[in-house]
Image (tube, rainbow, N blue to C red):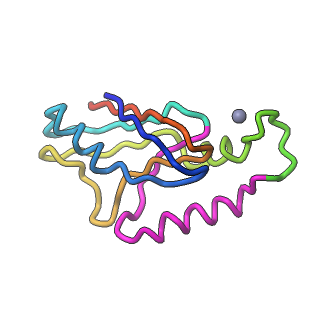
Amino acid sequence: MILTIKTTRQTELIDITSEVQEKVGAAGISDGFCFIFVPHTTAAVTINESADSSVKSDILTILNQVVPWEAGYRHLEGNSPAHIKSSLIGASEWVAVENGKLALGTWQGIFFCEFDGPRTRKVHIRFF
Ligand code: ZN
């Protein structure tokens, strides 16, 4: 299964928890694992607090400080910081599925991470 996401900023975190949960329902999975994979070199996926949206803005603020847009990078495409952030955060996550629901903690959400937008992105979702 594939989710298509249209991002609107150069860097942003987008909560995709409800979209992934819909795929769990569509697949009819009761118990198992959900594997979420981002097939892009300048994007990522992470699990973190979804209750307070200031957490995602803090994550982006610090990532942008740690990996600044200008730092004498050699990659000619000019988007090395996006590649670096993608590797720091990672391209995949696993979430347990119990009784047809993602077994996330109370405060957890699944976030697609855009680091070189805006673009149209894909997220692959598989069940095991
Ligand atoms: Zn590049």
Horizontal and vertical percent position of residue 68: 75, 57
Q: On the rendering, which quadrant does ligand 1 occupy?
A: top right
Q: Is residue 22 above or below residue 69?
A: above
Horizontally, residue 100 falls left or right of residue 116, namely: left
Is residue 116 one of those drawn in magenta? no
Q: Nearer the viewer, residue 52 or 97?
A: 52
Q: Quadrant of residue 42?
A: top right
Q: Residue at x 72, y 55 (%)?
A: 67
Horizontal and vertical percent position of residue 10: 61, 50
Q: Is residue 53 above or below residue 109?
A: below
Q: Residue furthest top?
A: 1
Report the span colored magenta: 42-69
Q: Nearer the viewer, residue 95 or 18?
A: 18
Q: Residue at x 62, y 65 (%)?
A: 61
Q: Quadrant of residue 66?
A: bottom right
Horizontally, residue 108 falls left or right of residue 64, namely: left
Horizontally, residue 101 falls left or right of residue 121, namely: left
Horizontal and vertical percent position of residue 91: 51, 39
Can you say which quadrant of the picture contains the N terminus?
top left
Horizontal and vertical percent position of residue 101: 18, 48
Q: Residue at x 34, y 68 (%)?
A: 51
Q: Nearer the viewer, residue 53 or 31?
A: 53
Can you say which quadrant of the picture contains the C terminus?
top left
Q: Residue at x 55, y 33 (%)?
A: 40
